[in-house]
């Protein structure tokens, strides 16, 4: 039961972080604080309140980027690119 309470608290904290981050991004893109606040609240509600398991997706991406970033350094820089990735 304690572990579930901790996970719920982490979900709430992550949701608030996403809300603040989305608000800052929307304010910069839209140029209006009230519209950005409404946009951020709607997106966070629709995404994380209706589907609470989605809150863990960015956390997993963050952990992968943090702990497994050295994996990409092992790819040789002169490796041949696939046809669809060539400039």
Image (cartoon, rainbow, N blue to C red):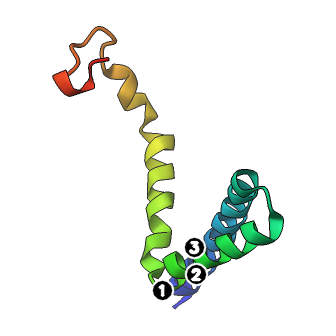
Residue sitting nearer the eye, 12 or 38: 38
Disc with the residue nearer the chain's start (2 vs 1): 2
Which residue in the protein does label 3 denote? 43
- Proximity of marks 3 and 2: CB atoms separated by less than 8 Å: yes
Which residue in the protein does label 2 denote? 45
Disc 2, SS: helix
Disc with the residue nearer the chain's start (3 vs 1): 3
53 on left or right of 38: left
- Mark 1: give few (<14), some (14-19) or many (20+) Cα within 10 Å: few
30 on left or right of 69: right
Mark number, residue 50: 1
Question: Residue 71 appears at what percent x and percent y?
Answer: 36, 30
User: What is the residue that sits farthest to the top in this orientation?
Assistant: 78
Disc 3, SS: helix
Residue sitting nearer the eye, 1 or 26: 26
Mark number, residue 19: none
User: What is the residue that sits farthest to the right in this orientation?
Assistant: 33
Question: Residue 68 appears at what percent x and percent y?
Answer: 41, 39
Residue depth check, mark 3 versus mark 1: number of the one nearer the observer: 3
23 on left or right of 64: right
Residue at 61% over, 78% down: 42
- Mark 3: give few (<14), some (14-19) or many (20+) Cα within 10 Å: some
- Proximity of marks 2 and 1: CB atoms separated by less than 8 Å: yes
The quarter of the picture where residue 54 lies is: bottom left
> Which quadrant: the C terminus?
top left
Q: Is residue 17 above or below residue 43?
A: above
Residue sitting nearer the eye, 31 or 7: 31
Q: How far apart are the two marked residues, 3 and 2, measured between alpha carbons?
A: 5 Å
Q: How far apart are the two marked residues, 3 and 1, measured between alpha carbons?
A: 10 Å
Q: Is residue 26 above or below residue 50?
A: above
Q: How far apart are the two marked residues, 2 and 1, measured between alpha carbons?
A: 7 Å
């Amino acid at each position: 039961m304690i572990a579930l309470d901790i996970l719920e608290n982490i979900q709430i904290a992550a949701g608030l972080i996403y809300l603040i981050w989305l608000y800052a991004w929307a304010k910069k893109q839209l140029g209006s604080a009230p519209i950005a606040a409404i946009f951020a609240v709607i997106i966070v509600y629709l995404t994380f309140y209706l589907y609470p398991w989605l809150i863990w997706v960015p956390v997993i991406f963050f952990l992968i980027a943090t702990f497994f970033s050295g994996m990409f350094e092992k790819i040789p820089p002169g490796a041949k690119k696939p046809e669809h990735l060539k400039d």
